[in-house]
Amino acid sequence: MRGAAAQTAFSRRRAFLVTVGLGWGLYGGLGIINRPRYGTSRGLADVTRYIPMDALGWMWVACGAIAALAGLVVNCPRVQALGYVALAVPAGLWAGAFSAAAAGPYSEAIGSACGWGAFTIGVVLVSGMDDPPPPHLRKKVR
């Protein structure tokens, strides 16, 4: 019986939250706070006029922690929705900032704008998906 309970408790959506949330936290801590790349700093110039790069890094860490913790909560779609918002906000900010930079003096930012924009849309799409039903509720293939 214990194996059946463990199987029904696993959720790909929650695993996505935990995995990407941990990645967001590490990206913020190691890639933004610790040593941001020149291209990242240059692409975010419009944002860093108002918000320091360290604060942006801590935003990634906080949003990652919120997403990862939301992924650990079972049977609470509202908390999981908050986790998906926490994943989408920094990626969307990056997409917008790099898009603005690409439209302006830093045309090389277009690749980052496309990547972050696609990832933001991917997070939104995954947030609306359902986990597949447990094996005993699936239709039998003939």
Image (tube, rainbow, N blue to C red):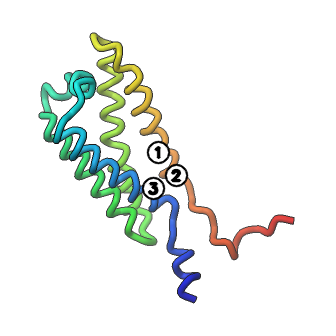
Which residue lies most toward the top here? 105
Mark 1 surroundings within 10 Å by alpha-carbon count, few (fewer than 14), some (14 through 19), many (20 or more): some
Count of numbered circles on the image: 3
Q: Of the residues under marks 2 and 3, which one precedes in the sequence?
A: 3
> Residue 46, position in %: x, y?
21, 23
Q: Is residue 141 left or right of residue 61?
A: right
Residue at point 41%, 23% (across, down): 111
Q: Which residue is mark 3?
A: 16
Q: Is residue 138 left or right of residue 42?
A: right
Which of the 4 image quarters holds residue 134?
bottom right
Image quadrant occupied by the C terminus: bottom right
- Amino acid type, mark 2: Gly
Structural distance between the alpha carbons of marks 2 and 3: 13 Å
Mark carried by residue 128: 2
Structural distance between the alpha carbons of marks 1 and 2: 7 Å
Residue at point 34%, 56% (across, down): 67
Q: Which residue is mark 1?
A: 124
Whether residue 33 is situated above or below residue 100 in the rendered picture: below
Mark 2 surroundings within 10 Å by alpha-carbon count, few (fewer than 14), some (14 through 19), many (20 or more): few
> Residue 37, position in %: x, y?
24, 29
